[in-house]
Image (cartoon, rainbow, N blue to C red):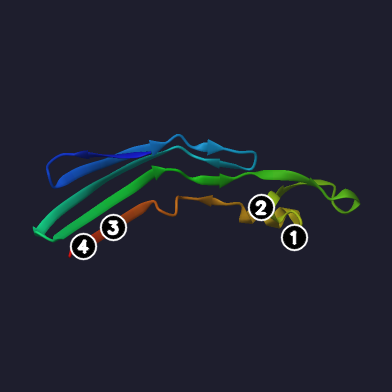
Amino acid sequence: MAWMTPLTPHLGVIWGGSTGERGEKYTLAPSLKVGVVFQAAPTKNTVFSIKATTLLGGTLKEKSCRADYGDIGGVQEVNCRLAASTLEPAETLKYLVHEKPYNQNQIQIQLSLHF
């Protein structure tokens, strides 16, 4: 969730956060969102705004699982998504996701003309 707290008629602070999430095969860390927004009306029919935000935290981590390859390999730790691929089970662990949010840093510039 995110909110905007006005500081002046043209300037505001953006703040919020997420509690994160856990699943059987992944963890999404909690996050804190902070930012600033500026808005001005240079003319009666024009609005200019700029918004910049950043996310602190929110890392996505994929978990490994155990797969049974029977007589050819037994039970091994493997990347769950790639367990049925042609890669060796140990090789699949290189492809476990550990990523920061895709929208970690954002800048939005907007010019609206009303006619």
Q: Is residue 89 left or right of residue 20?
A: right
Label 1–label 2 contact, CB within 8 A: no
Q: Earlier in the sequence, mark 2 or mark 4?
A: 2
Q: Are marks 2 and 4 in contact (CB under 8 Å)?
A: no
Which residue was labeled with disc 3?
108
Q: Earlier in the sequence, mark 3 or mark 2?
A: 2
Helix, strand or loop at mark 4: strand
Give the labeled residue for mark 1. 85
Residue 93 circle label? 2
Asked which quadrant contains residue 46, the reply is bottom left
Of pointers 1 and 3, the one earlier in the residue sequence? 1
Q: Amino acid at mark 3?
A: Gln
Label 4: few (<14), some or many (≥20) within 10 Å? few
Of the 4 image quadrants, the one containing the N terminus is top left
> Label for residue 111?
4
- Name the kind of residue labelled 1 in the image: Ser
Secondary structure beneath disc 1? loop
